[in-house]
Image (spheres, helix red, strand yellow):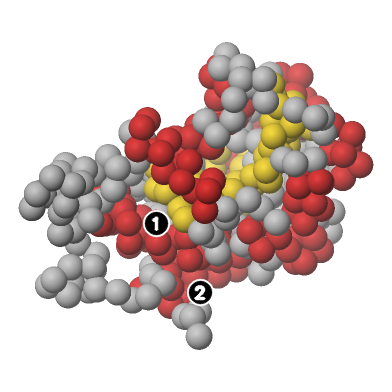
Amino acid sequence: MGYSFETRCIHGEDHRVVDEYRAISTPIYQTSSFSHIKPGHNLSGFDYSRESNPTRAHLEETMASLENAADCVAFASGMAAITACFELFSPGDHILMSDDLYGGVVRLVHNIEEKNGLKITFTDASDADNLKNMMTPKTKALYVESPSNPMMHVADLKECGRIAHEAGALFIVDNTFLSPYFMTPMDLGADIVLHSGSKFISGHNDTICGFLSSKDPEIAKKVRLISKTVGSTLGALECWLAERGLKTLHVRMERHQENACAIAEWLKTRTWVKKVFYVGDPEHPGHNKVKEQGRGFGSMISFETDTKERALAILQNVKLITFAESLGGTETLITYPDVQTHADVPQSVKDALGINDRLLRLSVGLENVKDLIEDLERSVSIAES
């Protein structure tokens, strides 16, 4: 019998000893190369850290286990992992993508991938009939975030996977917002799962990294070739930091969610809040689907204030909460998607999605939730005084 999720977060898949000294913490193999005993042979199985490194290998094995994947590659950032994913395709291939995505992915598509000959279409991934109609003979992949960033749209992943596979396409899921603790997309039909590991995986707002997990061993081999060739793999120190964060993923996610549920309920009672977007809210249209597909709701909340001035006042007056990009760390962060995370998204798209100058995105951290609520309340009171 295999270990439980929580145990694998701490020990990895098989609790193997990583080095001869039996260190409890995975050693940081801060080396560029590994020695050979004769041509084509070395004792460690490692040659050059761009290709492979023992610290990275242990982290990758753990992540693959948590995602129920055949293999996982750790990259220098989430965007590096996504870029490597696009390298699986050829000029002329069509990729169907959900329309509500992190703005950096939209920037990558318009500035790099379309230049490289990929045909990209953005569409509503929560509408199954729409997805079917958008599939073409050249469609090679369906790419979704669920919940999406920042509007928290929820896709039916099983249905998305079925539609993609019927069309002979891969199904790719960005699982950053929920982490493998709350959802394992490969159990729902995903072929590839992506993470900005800088977020909940590392969990401390101190590390940039990304992960690409593959279900099919043949795809996994291609990803490893891409990572070795392009050279965007994760350094040993960052691997150690990510693994250290991963050891508390299960504990952190529960507290993140507990705090987020309380703040979402509080926001719904404020007269200056017009809309709250949180998948843990029973009134959210995707709430039941998230319950069906996973084991929790995470800590990402978007909410719309009554005026632009109110939104700006909150950003300028919060004290405990930090006005900064990113998410998923121990500290609570508040972000202004319109001019930060989604600045490069065309205005017409932002208008259609509801990403306006009144929208704020909150990544709820691990502080005392009463302190967080008091900080938000105080920030509004200052603006009104």
| Residue at the image point whose x is 35% and y is 37% from the top | 228
The local crowd at label 1, few if under 14, some if 14 to 19, many if 20 or more residues have their Cα within 10 Å, is: many
Callout 1: SS: helix
Which residue is outermost to the bottom? 1
Residue furthest out toward the front = 39
Q: How many marks?
A: 2
Where residue 355 sits, quadrant-wise, is top right
Q: Is residue 205 left or right of residue 99?
A: left
| Depth check, front residue: 30 or 162 | 162
Left or right of 54 in this view: 67: right
Residue that appears at 41% across and 43% down: 224
Q: Which residue is mark 1?
A: 60
Dot 2 alpha-carbon crowd within 10 angstroms: few under 14, some 14 to 19, many 20 or more: some
Q: Secondary structure at mark 2?
A: helix
- Is 330 placed left or right of 121 in the picture? left
Residue closest to the eye, 14 or 273: 14
Q: Earlier in the sequence, mark 2 or mark 1?
A: 2
Q: Residue at x 47, y 80 (%)?
A: 3
Residue 90, quarter of picture: top right
Would residue 338 be found to the left or right of residue 122 on screen?
A: left
Type of the residue with mark 2? Phe
Residue drawn at x 13%, y 71% is: 20
**Location of mark 2 (residue):** 5
In x, y percent, where is residue 34? Answer: 14, 48
Q: Which mark is residue 261?
A: none
Give the answer, above or below, for where 199 lies relative to 81: below
Q: Amino acid at mark 1?
A: Glu
In percent of width and height, residue 12 lies at 38, 70
Picture coordinates of residue 215, whole percent (x, y): 57, 55
> Who is closer to the viewer here, 173 or 152?
173
